[in-house]
Image (cartoon, rainbow, N blue to C red):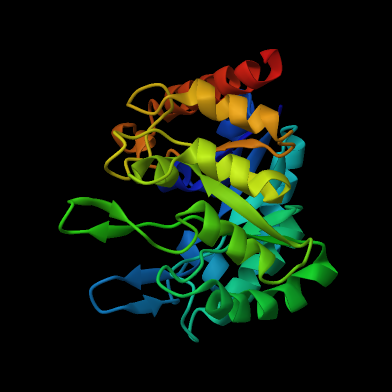
Amino acid sequence: MKTSTEINSASRIVGEEKAIELIAKAGFDAWDFSMFSMGVYDWGKKTFNFETGHPLSGKDYLAFARKLKKIGEDNGIHCNQSHAPFPSGSDEVFPYLLRAIECTAEAGGEICVIHPESFSTPEQNAEMYAKLLEFSKPMGVKIATENMWGWNSEKNRAGFAACATPESFVAHVDALNDDYMVACLDIGHAEMMDDTNAVELIRALSHRLKSLHIHDNDKWHDSHQIPFTMQIDFPPIVKALKEINYDGYFTLECDSYLKAFNAENVEEGVKNLSNSARRLADMFEEM
């Protein structure tokens, strides 16, 4: 079982180029190409800013993706997947979802995770995904939808959103009946729900599950912390992955964890992440 982690959290401290070097040095097999710097979303105004000054938002975005691929290769690791900007449903973001797919292909990634619109139906989200697949398939890039969550104010906890239940998740993947449309299970999101959990989603998704976002939380908030530090019980989850013969990567998305680190000690933090991912991978292999 190979391990991977997103580069966004380390990149905020040392930049993407150095982040990939640190991820390789820490022992990860691959890196997850976070593309959130492509556009910054204002949740209050509900608008994107795509003039961020970052290479991914400029005209040389493909050159930047090639540069990161080369750094990975020089350090013995590769890009396994990516994450496009979100939210995904507006006309203004669509060209940048296509750009994210281009960057994924250029970096050598096989899967681009693109969020569904949280409160749209599988059929409505399928319209967006169908257009994306027309673009991604010739490049050899699969699109992964991800389980989302809303907030139930009455219960004061996570509530339904697209792909949050086994029925919704399966329906989103199957709506297009295409091998290039797959599932990315966010384990933290799944464990926030009170009517399902990661194990149920894994078993329902079965062969559809090709990608993971692994992190820990208190089973209430979307904490995105390092595994084995909060409340998620990982052995049953790993067992369920083994049962379905999961053949993807164990990819961490612990982007809050490194907020406690700085340029002087971020290497230690990335190594801690690698150790936690390896612990999960070893658990999988020993079952």
Of residues 207 and 34, which is closer to you in this image? 207
Residue 181 appears in which quarter of the rendering?
Answer: bottom right
Of residues 6 and 240, which is closer to you in this image? 240
- Asked if one can make out residue 60 in the rendered structure from this viewpoint, the answer is no
Residue shown at 33% from the left, 27% from the top: 231
Residue 191 appears in which quarter of the rendering?
Answer: top left
Quadrant showing the C terminus = top right
Q: Position of 201 compared to 218: left or right? A: right
Q: Position of 177 compared to 201: left or right? A: right
Quadrant showing the N terminus = top right
Residue 235 rendering spot, x and y as whole percentages: 52, 21
Q: Position of 267 compared to 149: left or right? A: right
Total marks drawn? 0
Residue 260 rendering spot, x and y as whole percentages: 29, 33
Residue 162 rendering spot, x and y as whole percentages: 46, 64
Residue shown at 59% from the left, 41% from the top: 202
Residue 171 rendering spot, x and y as whole percentages: 60, 64
- Asked if one can make out residue 155 in the rendered structure from this viewpoint, the answer is yes
Question: Is the residue 254 above or below the residue 165 in the image?
Answer: above
Of residues 242 and 40, which is closer to you in this image? 242
Residue shown at 45% from the left, 55% from the top: 164
Question: Is the residue 35 above or below the residue 225 in the image?
Answer: below
Question: Is the residue 59 above or below the residue 206 in the image?
Answer: below
Residue shown at 67% from the left, 37% from the top: 249
